[in-house]
Image (cartoon, coloured by chain):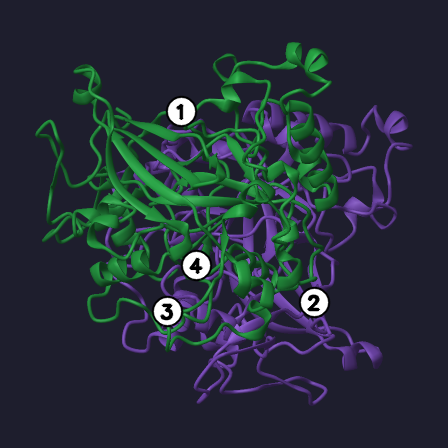
Chain colours: A green, B purple
Amino acid sequence: MSLHLDATHDPALRSWVASANAPGTDFPIQNLPYGRFRDLSALMAAPKATRVALRQALSAALAQHSPQQARLKDCLLAQTDAEMGLPCAIGDYTDFYTGIHHATTVGKLFRPDNPLLPNYKWVPIGYHGRSSTIVVSGTPLRRPLGQTLPPNAESPSYGPCQRLDYELELGALVGPGNSLGEPVAIAEAEDRLFGMTLLNDWSARDVQAWEYQPLGPFLAKSFGTTLSPWVVTMEALAPYRLPFQRPAGDPLPLSHLDSPANREAGAIDIALEVWLQTAAMRAAGQAAVRLSQSNFRDAYWTLAQLLTHQASNGCKLQPGDLLGTGTQSGPEPGQGGSLLELSDGGKQALTLPNGEQRRFLADGDQVILRAACERPGTARIGFGDCAGTVLPAPG
Amino acid sequence: MSLHLDATHDPALRSWVASANAPGTDFPIQNLPYGRFRDLSALMAAPKATRVALRQALSAALAQHSPQQARLKDCLLAQTDAEMGLPCAIGDYTDFYTGIHHATTVGKLFRPDNPLLPNYKWVPIGYHGRSSTIVVSGTPLRRPLGQTLPPNAESPSYGPCQRLDYELELGALVGPGNSLGEPVAIAEAEDRLFGMTLLNDWSARDVQAWEYQPLGPFLAKSFGTTLSPWVVTMEALAPYRLPFQRPAGDPLPLSHLDSPANREAGAIDIALEVWLQTAAMRAAGQAAVRLSQSNFRDAYWTLAQLLTHQASNGCKLQPGDLLGTGTQSGPEPGQGGSLLELSDGGKQALTLPNGEQRRFLADGDQVILRAACERPGTARIGFGDCAGTVLPAPG
């Protein structure tokens, strides 16, 4: 991990591409995110130095007064003319649990006597997710059917999920991988990361409550996961790195999960938001409403720790593998990154500006995740939308 | 699912290929398993009728007195001359928990007061596994490093796994898949299965005990999973189907997991064995010793139920996806499909014929899983070996 910033971060650097200079754009020339309009796999597998060289060449070519403007301007395509796919083929998807406020709040709902388990501050808790159902932003999502044990019922039944939820997460995509049996030292972990996306870990809470013991979430999660199409590179995020430290009194990470660079700049200041537009709002021409805000700097584990932990048993990571951060909730009650948290386990409905109420998602609801890094004097680095609309359950 | 047997099952059918007629062979002409010396993906994606037609053509071509003998005999390659790979590219790997004797015994070790959870007889419990570390039989396996909380320790530490174990499982490979959002009716589930392999779900028990709450097994399993290279087709297993029924007093499966065909012939009579050869035995020229025997007919859920459950929330299954059955232990104490069970959680060492003792696996141990269907008057359908040798942990 390095905090050396180069010319690609110069906030005064403007582009000859007008849309890159628009106020509030997610994608100024300092961002240069990648997306899969063409396949990214070969680039992801390349060593960090190759990626950085490409990034610097692109930045120079797109900067104002670039001599390459005449040659390049016909190669550009408006975003609206490109149909984006997933950024890459994703082999393995694992989802972590780095949001300590989320883990505590949800833990209270599932285990009131024991919200945060004894391993939480030692092990970056995670589980394997389903790769085949990861879809790109804009793909509609069918409400899943599932087996649940309704309150006070003697036996379970199978039917449409009644407690459909989103989870506000970031995803980190692996660049160069490691060989089977070879752990990755934390000092090398950041160089194995290609970049980040937004991730909506759609969740069927009623299915989850009934199925998750003893082997963890399974069908409650595997019906769909939405990714934003743009991969914001680790290089673009460099100006927004922050020191990473544990609250006083918490244990220090074990030595293989600790390094000076990780302490110095392991955290990232990424502001996160969840927006909701219901079918009624859409019909009335009303814009989406913001449900919550949080920040990735509150995560209890860094991306380098997640990657090192994942490979610590010799597990092979491959270019395009996806590491989810887990739900990013802030410390305050209104900062929950899921409806489960915002509605206190479904007990307290949220009232929307148009009078509608939500404990969980209704058919027709569109959930939009947004993220951006912003600081005066530094270029805004945005992520683009991660959106999905809920369709009714199958017949 | 169909019990109609065709000429490919005729036990009198002999081949002009001598090795197919050898007594005790796993691979008589009635088996015809597939392996990936060439890629199987296109065949796996084909509808059942195509697979069956190919199987019948191969069976006829390899049978004694086949007119094609002259043309084909130069196309055959001795098994010893072929380096086998994994049978196919595996997109998603999920592992189930259908061995009720295993679930009960292990449940007692982890939760003495609550061995079999209330959902076990209703939900085919499963979790997502790691695809990138699935290897073919014969691939050595490094003892993993991992984080554990040693007995009586105040804080965890990171080091070589001290309780390395195997798990005796079968794997089912998906043939034609389904679309995202479209469940698969149980009546169609068997036609979506291509065939079966042996599967060793290597497990780090000390890592598992510390990490598995609340999201399930993760690094305790992701360091390696071994598959046998041959896919025994569902068609070859047809003569060994058995009625599937729950013990008296147990709940019936929910209707979407129940069908007349599943009750009539959902189970499969596959005899399973675990063999162990230690480094000392190998050095002394001593053959492997059998540790346990069990049978897949004791599984609490059928393959059709697993596939239908997996797709019941709309999860997309793709050709080559792998469904593990979970550890297949028999009802008797000596029939545990893992050392965890055979050693009563590590409390009772097994003494091997050469005097060595094992509670868990030692470096140099080779574990070999074997399986076969046998009945007088019916061709023996074997699986070939699923073997792996433990290497020392990384320095």
**Closer to the camera, B274 or A261?**
A261
- Are the residues under marks 4 and 2 on the same chain? yes
- Are the residues under marks 2 and 3 on the same chain? yes
On what subunit does the disc labeled 1 rest?
A
Q: Which residue is mark 1?
A: A138
What amino acid type is highlighted by mark number 3?
Thr
Marks 1 and 2 sit apart, C-alpha to C-alpha, by: 42 Å
Q: Which residue is mark 2?
A: B142
Q: Earlier in the sequence, mark 4 or mark 2?
A: 2
Q: Which mark is residue B104?
A: 3
Which numbered disc, 2 or 3, marks the residue closer to the eye?
Answer: 2
Task: Answer left or right for A170 relative to B122.
Answer: right
What amino acid type is highlighted by mark number 2?
Arg
Decide: few, some or many residues near mark 4? Use Cα within 10 Å; few <14, some 14-19, many ≥20.
Answer: many
- Are the residues under marks 3 and 1 on the same chain? no
Q: Secondary structure at mark 2?
A: strand
